[in-house]
Amino acid sequence: METYDVVLIGAGHNSLVCAAYLLKVGYSVLLLEKNSIPGGAATTEELMPDEAPGFKFNPCAIDHIFIHLGPVVQELELNKYGLEYLFCDPVVFCPHPDGKYFLAHRSVEKTCAEIARFSPRDAQKYAEFAEFWQRVVGMLIPIFNAPPKSVVDMLGNYDLNKLNDVFSLIGSSDKTLDLIRTMFTSPMDLINEYFDSEFLKAPLARLAAELSTPPSQKNMAVGSIMMTLRHNPGMARPRGGTGALSKALVRCVQDLGGIIRTEQDVQKVLVDEGRAVGVRLANGKEYRAKDGVISSLDAQRLFLKLVDPKDVDAANPELRERVDRRITNHNEAILKIDCALSEPPRFIHHQHRDENMMGAVLIADSVAQVELAHTDPNIGRIPLEDPSMYAVVPTIRDPSMAPEGKHTLWIEYFVPYQIAGAEGTGLNGTGWTEELKNKVADRVLAKFADYAPNVSSSIIARHIESPPELERRIGVTKGNYYHLDMTFDQMMFFRPLPELANYKTPIEGLFLTGAGTHPGGSISGLPGRNCARVFLQTQRPLVQALTDAGEMIKSTASSLFNLS
Ligand SMILES: Cc1cc2nc3c(=O)[nH]c(=O)nc-3n(C[C@H](O)[C@H](O)[C@H](O)COP(=O)(O)OP(=O)(O)OC[C@H]3O[C@@H](n4cnc5c(N)ncnc54)[C@H](O)[C@@H]3O)c2cc1C
């Protein structure tokens, strides 16, 4: 039987990142991926080779932001393996029904100048809003870049700039209380506190709600970072599509001696005397792991499907019930629409310029519309009356993704996973059928055409994926694009549960990484990097503690040096 030091389940980008760090320090590593290509929710594929040959699509992630908050790209030298990031500027365009539009640039000043054309007061407030959230981001970066329960790691990440951000936010007791109060509010509360104009409030609400909760959700004000991050560090896409990141990671892993096997459906984690010792595939083949098994599948899939109940119960008799019932995975999911276009959409009512579509194109007419875009799916309704959406025309920034002169359209539209009243019908009993997904796509595209009428006649071919289809393709329960909800109660040392939050599990040698662990979903690689650190801490506690302490001293010294 083949034996490796570490076996990783799944080869999404977080697994690949985790594997690369372990390979760098000499472990032998095997990654087992159920699909025919690695990457998970970070791939680029020719989805319609017959109807639209030469058009490349990102079936899932497109806009990369969080990966620029950490050192993964630099530490793994991914540029050497072919990764090139193309930053977007402008970053957001949101046309409004009254003819105004929100156009956000990478620069806050330029964005304020755009807002000032319609509302000088809101422009001034926007500068304050962006500045405040930038300082919050400065405070959060060190936390994102460390295992949530590893205080030494976390402290080591604070340089003087970041400490300045912290003290500017919590420098006195009233400031600290006010910061906490802000975090307890909702994105909607904050947006109303700062701004007057709907053309600005609606896109900010839409982006804040990308954490998958409605803008009115209390305790989720932190969603406001989703706009500020588009200014700094900025929003980028790998040249050639999101899959170029996964391809670079694959090359890196293979160059370091790692083995990646595709079409390997892991069905069981093998546990012997309370220790994870390997995995078994659906076809019966087994692989042994000497030092550990790392799962990039979330805790619900791991503990409820892949580990024998008696092995889980032996490690922690309450765990299965807590994983099953305490972790939340709401009903909101994504209907994904990809189109091959003969020409770029034209926003004829909004002083059309192709470059306005460089970043995200938001259809968000009002905060109320965005609210319904999230609350309806949660109770099983498709918010069809007036669709809000996140769209991208990737070929504006990267023409290599389509034949010359042609374009693509990427649309993310929130829908329920389980349609109310349709239980037991359609795919997986969710109510989703071919007919329904096409009907919904027709409505979404018609709404898009209200703004860019030429889109209707320029569609060469389209590919629609419903939530249960996404669930089947990459295995995510209920098609949850973040594996588990990204609500405050499931972030940091609560993700996915306090007892599982530091990438370790009660089964010795079994580790968790991926979007279902801190700091969560999105393209960041940070769950992978943090998990590798914890794995190494358990393997060689003294060496790793000294390395961490050394890094802390180095970081403090370098920030002092930079300041002087
Ligand atoms: C439609 C959509 C749009 C998105 N847009 C963005 C975006 O623009 N920007 C952004 O930052 N994030 C976006 N996200 C979120 C982001 O893509 C994910 O959070 C991230 O890719 C998760 O990476 P991961 O490596 O943790 O997990 P995954 O990518 O889910 O990888 C897990 C891997 O495990 C494999 N697997 C599952 N079960 C098994 C098994 N039993 N045996 C073997 N292998 C298995 C899967 O096939 C998969 O390859 C989007 C997600 C979706 C779905």
Image (cartoon, rainbow, N blue to C red):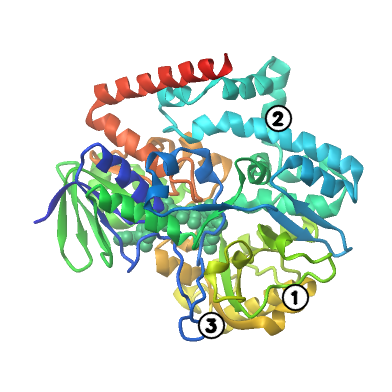
Of 296 and 533, which appears nearest the observer? 533
* Cα gap from disc 2 to disc 1, whole angstroms: 41 Å
Compared across the picture, whether 536 is left or right of 424 comes to left
| Mark closer to the chain start, 1 or 3 | 3
Label 3 beta carbon within 8 A of ligand 1: no
Q: Quadrant of residue 477?
A: bottom left
Give x and y (percent) for residue 300: 39, 52
Quadrant in the picture for the N terminus:
bottom left
* Cα gap from disc 1 to disc 3, whole angstroms: 22 Å
Compared across the picture, whether 484 is left or right of 289 comes to right
The amino acid sitting under disc 1 is Ala
The amino acid sitting under disc 3 is Glu
Mark nearer the viewer, 1 or 3: 1
Residue at 72% x, 68% y: name it. 387
| Mark closer to the chain start, 3 or 2 | 2
Q: Which mark is residue 110?
A: none
Q: Residues within 10 Å of mark 2 (few under 14, many from 20)?
A: few
Residue bearing the label numbered 3: 434
Residue at 62% x, 60% y: name it. 378
Q: Residues within 10 Å of mark 3 (few under 14, many from 20)?
A: few
Give x and y (percent) for residue 419: 58, 71
Mark nearer the viewer, 2 or 1: 1
Label 1 beta carbon within 8 A of ligand 1: no
Residue bearing the label numbered 1: 449
